Image: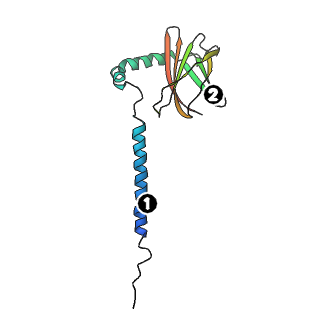
Amino acid sequence: MTTALAPRGRYIPWLFVAGFAVVVAVNATMMWFAVGSFSGLYTSKPRERGLHYNSIVAEQKARDELGWRVEPVWRPSTGRLEIAVSDAAGYPLADARVFVELVRPAEKRPPVGATLAMIDAGRFAGYVDLPARGNWDLDIVVEHGADRYAQTRRMFLK
């Protein structure tokens, strides 16, 4: 009497199928989280911004013609944000006012405002309590007399 034994490797193809099923399930979950967590819109009213595109371009040209330089520096050990503002010739802008908002580009959070005080001619500093570390967009507005200069800088803040 002979009995037929099942081959030992019969389950191996099913291991490949199970492995691919796990990969597909993980990828589908990651896509679901990615699509659900970020709308892809940077502004709250993108249609209005698009309708006024030419005026936005004209404002950017006027800003670029000023030639001002804005140099932000982040001190992670103290949570201090420093901004140096200079004109086209490299001289500090005395009597300027600086306004800063920090926006987290990958999350739907309200902007974090930063109050900066003038510490020297053309140099401003303030402390910022960040809710999370990572990439942040610094929306910087500098006003000097009748001129207004706006710039966005992306920085990794920890």
Residue at 44% over, 19% down: 60
Q: Is residue 81 left or right of residue 60?
A: right
Which quadrant of the view contains residue 15?
bottom left
Q: Is residue 85 above or below residue 42?
A: above
Q: Type of residue at label 2? A: Gly
Viewer-nearest residue: 71 or 74: 74
Residue at 41% over, 53% down: 25
Q: Residue furthest bottom?
A: 1
Earlier in the chain: of badge 2 and badge 1, it is 1
Q: Is residue 32 above or below residue 19?
A: above
Viewer-nearest residue: 131 or 49: 131
**How far is mark 2 from mark 1, CA to CA?**
45 Å
Report which residue position mark 2 lands on: 79
Q: Secondary structure at mark 1?
A: helix
Residue at 54% over, 17% down: 99
Report which residue position mark 1 lands on: 19
Viewer-nearest residue: 132 or 59: 132
Q: Is residue 80 left or right of residue 7?
A: right
Badge 1: residue crowd in 10 Å (few <14, some 14–19, many ≥20): few
Q: Is residue 36 above or below residue 96?
A: below
Badge 2: residue crowd in 10 Å (few <14, some 14–19, many ≥20): some
Residue 112 is situated, as x and y percent measured from the top left of the image, at 53, 25
